[in-house]
């Protein structure tokens, strides 16, 4: 893809950071604007500000990134946000991994209509911009530090409850399969 084609594809695209000036500083927004020349970045103070926006073309809103301080509100309003901005990637920006883990568990239990990405704010500049680029391009990103913990929690829960619960969810058949006698097992093994 040529540079001009890329610019025309992204022209008119907006990304909203939702949080106060400490969460998303003016220099951070300027850096994003310089790095993505065809994308307009704006900061809004609250989720209510976001939901009350009168946007001509909601399909051009590509990313909505909320700060960790809005985790509970974000989970309460996620369906409304995703309904209002159906083309936007929604993401949780965080500095404290434990808050992101808590938010991830809430999202797992809540199951929003579309996925949620994560933007680690404590990464070096190049990685931060790379993750931001993924979000602007419509991808969800889950950092390894969250991914591993999330799946470790799922695995330990499965181990505690055994394989039966997993089998019941996977198959709508009766919970107990016919038992094969040990004589039949020995016969099958020796054959």
Image (tube, helix red, strand yellow):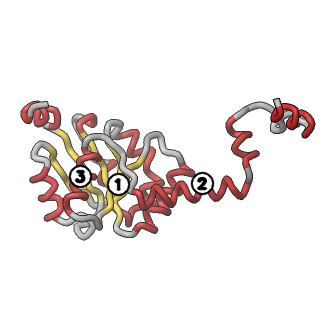
Q: For this rendering, which residue is in front, 47 or 31?
A: 31
- Residue 24: give x, y in percent of width and height: 24, 63
Which mark, residue 130?
A: 3
Q: Which residue is mark 1?
A: 48
In the figure, residue 168 lies in which quadrant? top right
Q: Which residue is mark 2?
A: 154
| Label 2 or label 3, whichever comes before in sequence order | 3
| Label 2 or label 1, whichever comes before in sequence order | 1
The CA span between labels 2 and 3 is 29 Å
Count neighbours of disc 3 (C-alpha within 10 A) and say few if under 14, some if 14 to 19, many if 20 or more. few
Question: Residue at point 86% right, 36% down?
Answer: 185
Q: Is residue 116 left or right of residue 44?
A: right
Q: Are marks 2 and 3 in contact (CB under 8 Å)?
A: no
Count neighbours of disc 1 (C-alpha within 10 A) and say few if under 14, some if 14 to 19, many if 20 or more. few
Question: Residue at point 36% right, 55% down?
Answer: 118
Q: Are marks 2 and 1 in contact (CB under 8 Å)?
A: no
Quarter of the figure that contains the N terminus: top left
């Amino acid at each position: 893809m040529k540079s001009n084609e890329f610019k025309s594809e992204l022209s008119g695209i907006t990304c909203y950071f939702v949080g106060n000036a400490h969460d998303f500083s003016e220099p951070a927004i300027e850096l994003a604007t310089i790095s993505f020349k065809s994308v307009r970045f704006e900061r809004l103070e609250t989720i209510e500000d976001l939901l009350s926006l009168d946007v001509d073309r909601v399909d051009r809103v590509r990313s909505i990134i909320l700060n960790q301080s809005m985790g509970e509100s974000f989970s309460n309003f996620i369906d409304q946000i995703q309904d209002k901005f159906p083309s936007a990637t929604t993401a949780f920006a965080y500095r404290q991994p434990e808050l992101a883990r808590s938010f991830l568990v809430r999202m797992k239990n809540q199951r929003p209509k579309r996925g949620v990405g994560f933007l680690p704010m404590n990464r070096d500049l190049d990685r931060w911009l790379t993750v931001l680029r993924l979000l602007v391009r419509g991808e969800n990103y889950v950092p390894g530090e969250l991914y591993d913990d999330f799946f470790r929690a799922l695995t330990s829960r499965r181990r505690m409850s055994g394989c039966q619960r997993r089998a019941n969810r996977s198959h709508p058949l009766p919970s107990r399969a016919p038992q094969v006698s040990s004589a039949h097992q020995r016969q099958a093994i020796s054959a």
